[in-house]
Amino acid sequence: MANTRITSVGRRGFLKSAAAVVATAQSVPPNAVAQNSAAPPAAPDWLALTREPALEPQLPIIDPHHHFWDAADRMPRRYLLEDLAADVQGHNVRQTVFIECGSMYRADGPEEFRVVGETEFVQGVAAESASGRYGDLRAAAGIVGTADLRLGDRVAPVLEAQIAASRQRFRGIRHGAAWAEPGVLPTGSVAARNTNRPSVPAHVLLDPAFRRGYAYLRTYGLTFEGWVYHTQIAELTDLAKAFPDTTIIFNHLGGPIGVGAFTGRRDEVFRAWKPAVAELARCPNVVAKVGGIQMVVNGYGWHERKQPPPSGELLAANRDWVPAVACSRATSRSTGFRVRTPCSGTSSRS
């Protein structure tokens, strides 16, 4: 793998917005809080309680992980281009990558093709951004959609339809795989998620049917977003080794769990997580995005605070996880992860 280089952790208040991501969980009934999925941006008045200027406002940024939606069952109901543009003000965000979130699926047609509606929707948003209406920002310059890879060989026409929906922007697939043994999470074995999204069965990355579908990613030159909990990193490593020609993007730093059965066990979780990440870093087809570890499932409890924590506190809370990913080369025979760092403001919600 290429040498690790993190250019923005701690310098752009990268984790400031991560607190914003989970902050509005305070307005959700405790039994309704999704542990890792689609947490909405925090209320502006809450965010305004802690303000910090960008340290390097001219630093060019590509944000590789955010979402768009307009749905009555989410809070807030919508997060669209104007919201993204507002969140990145003060930073030089040039391009972004949209990551699937179960948004705007088709209402009819064959079930397996309904996911294509999300790509069609985001392609329109990307075209609006490309008009220059929001300055130099080019939102959704890359689009990562989804498909039920458990379809096996039948997933091929779905992938072709996804590519056709955005030939210049469609880049990859995310099929959620974050699953925990029953009793580990307060919500059960998986986090709450939209019912129209592909389900997350146990050990899906090891499922032969899933892997038959996964093999088509190489055929079509698509990447795979690897979203798992820390207890499953070895399964992602197994997948990476079985398909060395398919690029995997390691999401959310492997989802270290800090709630439910893992409440108060952060040191223990880190000791299990670190060698698992080092082993994954041996795979030359894996890259990492630094972000998405401020969600409720990670157990920091930012959403319970009366005001957003300052960036220094956020960085201190994350000083173990981020350097460990960046320094995987020190514990690996390879050269370690290439790291993609999400923009502060809008990233890493599911």
Image (cartoon, grey):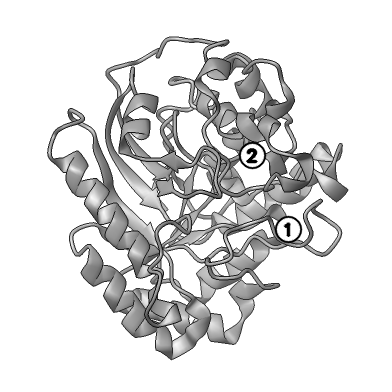
> Where's residue 41, x and y in %?
52, 33
Q: Look at label 1 and name its amino acid.
A: Thr
* Image-based side of 221 in relation to 78, left or right: left
Question: Does the CB distance between marks 1 and 2 fall below 8 Å?
Answer: no
Q: Name the residue: 69% across, 30% down.
A: 26
Above or below 254: residue 176: below
| Residue toward you, 298 or 131 | 131
| Precedes in sequence: disc 1 or disc 2 | 1
Above or below 12: residue 258: below
Give me the disc on residue 295: 2
Q: Name the residue: 54% across, 18% down.
A: 47
Return the residue found at the far left.
131
| Residue toward you, 241 or 345 | 345
Name the residue that disc number 1 marks.
Answer: 231
Q: Name the residue: 52% across, 76% down.
A: 242
> Where's residue 23, x and y in %?
62, 29
To which quarter of the image does residue 267 belong? top right
